[in-house]
Image (cartoon, helix red, strand yellow):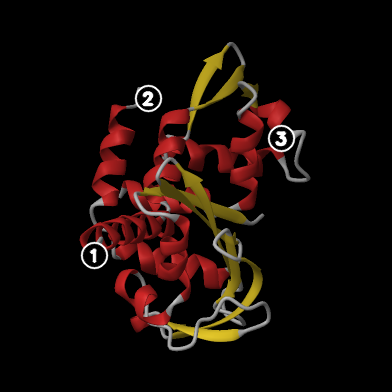
């Protein structure tokens, strides 16, 4: 289920921090791991969860794995996934409609 | 890490009229939720009836007549903040909403988030399609 993967991926502070770090450009697994007080395998596991949710892309160059942020699903998350944002957009549209109808 | 939602909407009506939609109980109920006792007065405590979510306790924290209204929302449960800003735009008003204090590390917020998501079945297929369209 893609939605489960995405919720799981986003609902973790380490993974959200990884996404933030990748905003400035691709980094190797090693460089990313060095920025956390976690073991390298633990950081790799977080990266795999992000990869399965299509939030990062993995590129193997020689012995190193480079990670790239894939921005499109992130935009989708912020635009569509946040249920409260959707809720407020709907309420605002209702407000506009009601005000137009009762205009006198 | 807390998150804030920003939403804005143009309304083809002057700020004074929009202000009444936000601050008068009977008008608020017409587009959002019932509140028997909302009043734009700093320190005023009121409730908003969110139906299945129950009555939410709120306290007005900031008022600038026809420009800004800010209150706490779901006190003691979610501790969110709701801020409405009104800006004249042409012959109408642009209404800005900030819904702040989301913390996805807090289990109560995670629950609210996922419960609310179930109410939006259309979102997930769209997201899934968007994800499919992105090169692997």
Residue A102's disc number: 1
Give x and y (percent) for residue A51. 47, 35
Quadrant the C terminus of chain A occupies: bottom left
From the image, tell me which residue sits under label 3: A33
Mark 2 falls within which chain?
B
Residue A2 relative to residue B78: left or right: left
**Tags 3 and 1 both on a single chain:** yes
Which residue is under mark 2?
A: B136
Q: CA distance from mark 1 to mark 2?
A: 50 Å
Spatial distance from mark 3 to mark 1, Cα to Cα? 59 Å
Circle nearer the viewer, 3 or 1: 1
Note whether residue B104 is visible: no
Q: Nearer the viewer, mark 1 or mark 2?
A: 1
Q: Is residue B54 above or below residue A9?
A: below
Residue A97: image x %, image y %? 25, 57
Question: What number of labels is visible?
Answer: 3
Give left or right: position of A18 versus B21.
right
Q: Residue furthest front?
A: A104
Instruction: Assess disc 1: are there few (<14), some (14-19) or many (≥20) residues with their C-alpha within 10 Å of its C-alpha.
Output: few
Mark 3–mark 2 distance (CA, rounded to whole Å): 23 Å
Identify which residue is drawn at 44% across, 53% down. A7
Marks 3 and 2 in Cβ contact (< 8 Å): no
Q: Quadrant of residue B51?
A: bottom left
Which chain is mark 3 on?
A: A
The mark that comes first in sequence, 3 or 1, is 3
- Percent across and percent down for residue A15 are 59, 44
Instruction: Please name which of the two marks, 3 or 2, marks the residue nearer to the observer.
Output: 2
């Amino acid at each position: 289920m893609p939605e489960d993967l995405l919720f799981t991926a986003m609902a973790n502070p380490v993974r959200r921090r990884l996404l933030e770090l990748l905003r400035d450009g691709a980094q190797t697994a090693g460089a990313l791991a060095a920025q956390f007080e976690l073991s390298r395998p633990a950081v790799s596991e977080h990266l795999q969860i992000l990869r399965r949710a299509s939030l990062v892309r993995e590129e193997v160059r020689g012995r190193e794995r480079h990670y790239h942020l894939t921005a499109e699903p992130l935009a989708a998350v912020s635009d569509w996934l946040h249920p409260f944002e959707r809720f407020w957009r709907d309420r605002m549209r209702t407000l506009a409609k009601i005000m137009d109808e009762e205009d006198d | 890490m807390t998150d804030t939602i920003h939403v804005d909407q143009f309304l083809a009506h002057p700020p004074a009229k929009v202000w009444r939609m936000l601050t008068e109980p009977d008008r608020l109920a017409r587009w959002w939720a019932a509140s028997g006792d909302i009043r734009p007065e700093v320190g005023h405590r009121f409730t908003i009836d969110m139906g299945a979510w129950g009555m939410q306790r709120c306290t007005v924290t900031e008022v600038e007549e026809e420009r800004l209204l800010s209150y706490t929302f779901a006190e003691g449960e979610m501790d969110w903040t709701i801020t409405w800003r009104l800006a004249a735009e042409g012959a109408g008003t642009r209404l800005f909403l900030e819904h702040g204090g989301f913390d996805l590390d807090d289990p109560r917020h995670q629950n609210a988030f996922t419960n609310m998501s179930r109410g939006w079945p259309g979102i997930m297929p769209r997201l899934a399609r968007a994800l499919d369209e992105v090169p692997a």
